[in-house]
Image (cartoon, rainbow, N blue to C red):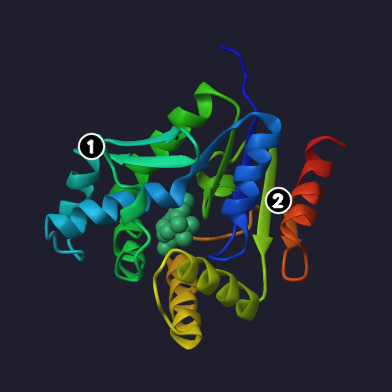
Amino acid sequence: MEKHTVIAIDGPAGSGKSTVAKLIAGRLNFVYIDTGAMYRALTLKAMREKIDLEDAAALTELARATKIDLAHDAGLKVFLDGEDVTGLIRTPELTNNVKHVAGVAGVRSEMVKLQQAIGRRRSSVLEGRDIGTVVFPDAQYKFYLDAHIEERTKRRHKELLESGMHVTLDAMKQDIETRDTSDIERKVGALKKAEDAVVVDTTHLTIDEVVEKLLSHIRP
Ligand code: DC
């Protein structure tokens, strides 16, 4: 089998992962895989079906019975059992609920299998929390992006405002801190820097500067 290149980008919310991963995938003609969108889509289904978010067995069952696809057509689109849910998975309510779904080992093993299958088909840029540690520990390139909490809050706040949602800066900061804690303290697939990852602090860098920095490691 032809060996494809995998670029793993991990880091907390607002570190710039998604924007940078998308641009790098575009520059290298790789597939961009937003693994957070997959956990979000499954959370949407759990909420719609009114599944108890504390019920790990029910969430695992749900993950096994759900088809999630990512399509690249004028931007990334997320499909949940064939339905385009791209515009429905970034509400603050859903964002707060993802931690329950993403904390379930059975859910994660289903998602990881799916991510590995996509990443093995073509050269890919995957971004998430556990890509370099769990999904592709043997990825050729691993990056860990981070930024100061105040800067991450500002970025996420701006994104939400641009998509027409309103939330105060304080509420946003609290939300990100809660998410950081659950991402870091989760027993499975926790947010963690892979030992061999290149760490980039994006606090004072523009998007282009981050992209160029990462590309300089990929194409030395
Ligand atoms: O990257 P994001 O903000 O869209 O991620 C949404 C949520 O999914 C976030 O709370 C952490 C979780 N997540 C995860 O547990 N593992 C991943 N590989 C990606 C995201």
* Residue 75 appearing in the image: yes
- Looking at the image, residue 81 sits to the left or right of residue 168; the answer is left
Confirm or reject: label 1 Cβ below 8 Å from ligand 1: no
Q: What residue type is labelled 2?
A: Ala
Question: What label sits on residue 81 in the rendered view?
Answer: 1
Image position, residue 134 (x, y; %): 51, 45
Q: Distance between the residues labelled 1 and 2?
A: 34 Å
Residue at 47% across / 71% down in the picture?
161
Does residue 142 lie above or below 178 as drawn?
Answer: above
Confirm or reject: label 2 Cβ below 8 Å from ligand 1: no
59 vs 123, nearest the viewer: 123
Name the quadrant of the C terminus. Answer: top right
Residue at 68% across / 41% down in the picture?
24
Residue at 36% across / 65% down in the picture?
95
Q: Is mark 2 on a helix, strand or loop?
A: loop
Q: Earlier in the sequence, mark 1 or mark 2?
A: 1
* Residue 139 appearing in the image: no
Question: What label sits on residue 119 in the rendered view?
Answer: none
Q: Is mark 1 on a helix, strand or loop?
A: loop
Residue at 66% across / 56% down in the picture?
144
The residue beneath circle 2 is 197
167 vs 199, nearest the viewer: 167
Does residue 118 lie above or below 102 as drawn?
Answer: above
Q: What residue type is labelled 1?
A: Asp
Image position, residue 38 (x, y; %): 37, 47
Q: Which of marks 1 and 2 is in front?
A: 1
